[in-house]
Image (cartoon, rainbow, N blue to C red):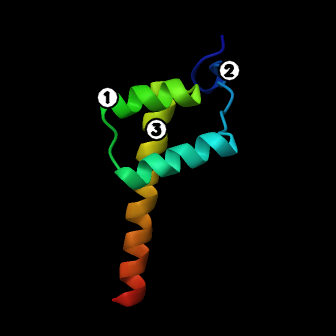
Amino acid sequence: MLEGKWKRRLPQKPKWSLSVEQRSELEKAFTEGPFIGKTRMARLTEDLGLREKQVSRWFNNQRAKMRKEAAAEGEVKG
């Protein structure tokens, strides 16, 4: 019998990538504020043709990138 390490792997979902238009619109929205509310989320998902999960994940990643850059800047200055 196959047990332990021989478990079957589930197929992975394909990765999604943003178009130049989508990226620029998200960046513009991020400059308005790093957190996104329900109304902005609804407008962006409808305008860009993305799912809420994609938009919220993009905003989360941008905030993480911003924190990482701020920490790196602190190390260089400090």
The location of residue 7, given as percent across then percent down, is 62, 20
Res. 48 visible in picture: yes
The location of residue 47, given as percent across then percent down, is 54, 28
Q: Secondary structure at mark 2?
A: loop
Horizontal side of residue 51 vs 15, given as left or right: left
Mark 3 nearby-residue class (10 Å; few <14, some 14–19, many ≥20)? few
Q: Which of the image's four quarters has the N terminus?
A: top right
Disc on the earlier residue, 2 or 3: 2
Amino acid type at mark 3: Arg
Q: Which of the image's four quarters has the C terminus?
A: bottom left
Residue for point 58% across, 25% down: 49
Q: CA distance from mark 2 to mark 1?
A: 32 Å
Above or below 78: residue 14? above
Query: Closer to the camera, 25 or 52?
Result: 25
Please report contact status of discs 2 and 1: CB closer than 8 Å, yes or no: no
Q: CA distance from mark 2 to mark 3?
A: 21 Å
Above or below 17: residue 11? above
Amino acid type at mark 1: Lys
Return the residue at label 1.
Answer: 38
Mark 1 nearby-residue class (10 Å; few <14, some 14–19, many ≥20)? few
Query: Closer to the camera, 1 or 72?
Result: 72
Q: Secondary structure at mark 3?
A: helix
Return the residue at label 3.
Answer: 57
Return the residue at label 2.
Answer: 11
Q: CA distance from mark 1 to mark 3?
A: 14 Å
